[in-house]
Image (cartoon, helix red, strand yellow):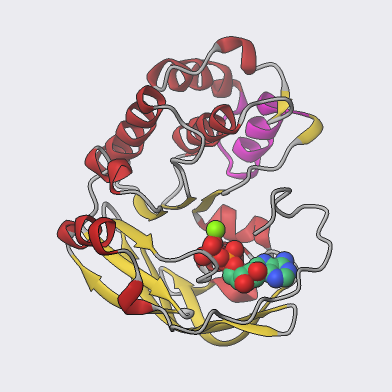
Amino acid sequence: MSELVIKGLTATVAGTDILRGLDLTIASGEVHAVMGPNGAGKSTLSHVLLGKPGYEVTGGSVTLDGADLLAMPTWQRAHAGLFLGMQYPTEVPGVSLDAMLRASFAAAEKNPDDVPALVLAEAGRIGFDEKFLTRPLNVDLSGGEKKRNETLQLGVLQPKIAILDELDSGLDVDALRMVSRRVEAATEESDLGVLVITHYSRLLTELKPDHVHVLAKGQILASGGPELAAELEDTGYAGYVDDEPAAEVKAEFDPFGDPHGV
Ligand code: ADP
Ligand code: MG
């Protein structure tokens, strides 16, 4: 049984406060859906949890089974059992999926020779065409194929806690069903804890959330059960945002950032 505990987390990006005292606890086997308006800080939360450069933690704590994640470099956080499925998965020319997963297995003292069979089994479970498996990581994959590639890695690596940022973006209905079923199955097969960021309750028909949270203004402003997701789809976030549009943060050029703007 693992537990990711986020307490009073505050963080700045490019000199602006984005996270403003965020509390969230995710335990093994649980699915927490985080929903919220554009620019609320959802992806910032995912980046801060994995330690992306440029996202500065100014207060609060994050622990995984009591260990201080914020004190660790990114690779150690992954080694401790944290996984991030990025909103915009990065293309890594020159590095194959096989090489990346073998290196991860070796680092975790698992047998790298087990990787090819696991990859094939996972590809089958989510309908991911084998022809994509030999490409450099995410290179020339469509948005939806990248999301399936991330899900495949999740299945092979079996982390303790997964953060999935807009897992549904770019996926067609059939792919969405397979991917969300796979993640839901992991919550039972390997007791995975999930923090899934989404705008749409349709993702949550197969990947069933135990808790739904509204992230707005850098905080969790409301929490409830699955009914909250349905309610938000009807009402939007009007009750959670100011009438005044939030001040735009001027984005600095980030070569690894979202190519379509944040
Ligand atoms: P969400 O995922 O909830 O839509 P984000 O966490 O991506 O929102 O962004 C929150 C705010 O932080 C936005 O105003 C965005 O412009 C800003 N922001 C995020 N990343 C950066 C960055 N690398 N540089 C500058 N501003 C950023
Ligand atoms: Mg985002």
Image height check: is 246 above or below 90? below
Residue in the foreground of this view, choosing between 232 and 152 = 232
| Residue visible at 20% across and 63% down in the picture | 228
| Residue visible at 23% across and 58% down in the picture | 234
Give the prevailing secondary structure in the magenta stretch: helix
Q: Please count the marks in the image.
A: 0
Please state the horizontal and vertical placement of residue 87, each as a whole percent of the image.
57, 49
Please state the horizontal and vertical placement of residue 198, each as a whole percent of the image.
40, 52
The answer to whether one can see residue 253 in this image is yes
> Which of the image's four quarters has the C terminus?
bottom right
> Which of the image's four quarters has the N terminus?
bottom left
Please state the horizontal and vertical placement of residue 258, each as a whole percent of the image.
69, 52
The span shown in magenta is 95-112
Q: Quadrant of residue 252?
A: bottom right
Q: Quadrant of residue 77?
A: bottom right
In the picture provided, is 27 more to the left or to the right than 224? right
> Which residue is at the far top?
131
Residue 119 sits inside the magenta stretch: no
The answer to whether one can see residue 72 in this image is no
Q: Quadrant of residue 177?
A: top left
| Residue visible at 82% across and 31% down in the picture | 93
Image height check: is 108 above or below 246? above
Image height check: is 220 above or below 125? below
Residue in the foreground of this view, choosing between 222 and 25 = 222
| Residue visible at 25% across and 37% down in the picture | 206
Please state the horizontal and vertical placement of residue 61, each as a whole percent of the image.
50, 82
| Ligand 1 lies in quarter | bottom right
